[in-house]
Amino acid sequence: MKRFSVSALALAAALVAAPVFAHADTTPGWYAGAGVGASFGVDPTMHTATGTHDAKFKSADAAFLGSVGYAWSNGLRLE
């Protein structure tokens, strides 16, 4: 029950905050963005005789993202 209550509270908070984050920035001009991430792969073919998943860690990879674009005042962007 506690897990359900925490999940329901998180969902309610996300629904209340969504319009704030969904509002598009209408400031025209050039913009640039960057991002960094990580991926931790596992071997999905490893299973035990009982059918439980016995995944083995394979590797960790880094991901880098860059973007440049132009934004118009109507919310349209060309990236």
Image (tube, grey):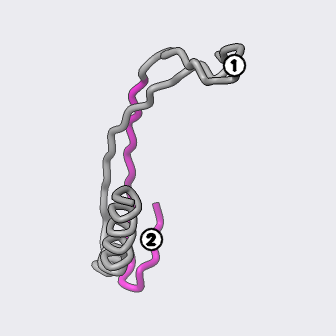
Name the residue nearer the viewer: 71 or 49. Answer: 49
Dot label at residue 15: none
Picture coordinates of residue 62, whole percent (x, y): 39, 28
- Give the answer, above or below, for where 32 lies relative to 53: below
- Residue at image position (69%, 19%) is 50
- State the CA–CA distance, disc 2 to disc 1: 52 Å
Query: What's the mark number on residue 50?
Result: 1
Kind of residue indicated by mark 2: Arg
How many C-alpha atoms fall within 10 Å of the one at disc 2: few (<14), some, or many (≥20)?
some
The correct choice, above or below, for 72 with respect to 45 in the image is below
Question: Would you say residue 66 sits in the magenta stretch?
Answer: yes
CB-based contact (under 8 Å), mark 2 and mark 1? no
- Residue 14 vs 60, above or below: the answer is below
Work out whether mark 2 precedes mark 1 in sequence or the reverse, and give the earlier one.
1
Q: Which residues are magenta?
A: 61-79
> Can residue 41 be spotted in the picture?
yes
Bin the neighbour count of mark 1 within 10 Å (Cα to Cα): few under 14, some 14-19, many 20 and up. few
Residue drawn 34% across and 58% down? Answer: 2
Closer-to-camera residue (20/48): 48
Closer to the camera: disc 2 or disc 1? Answer: 1
| Depth check, front residue: 39 or 77 | 39
Q: Which quadrant, please, contains the N terminus?
A: bottom left
Expressed as whole percent of the image width and height from the top left, the position of residue 46 reads 64, 16
Q: Which residue is mark 2?
A: 77
Which residue is pictured at 30% across the width and 62% down the height? 31
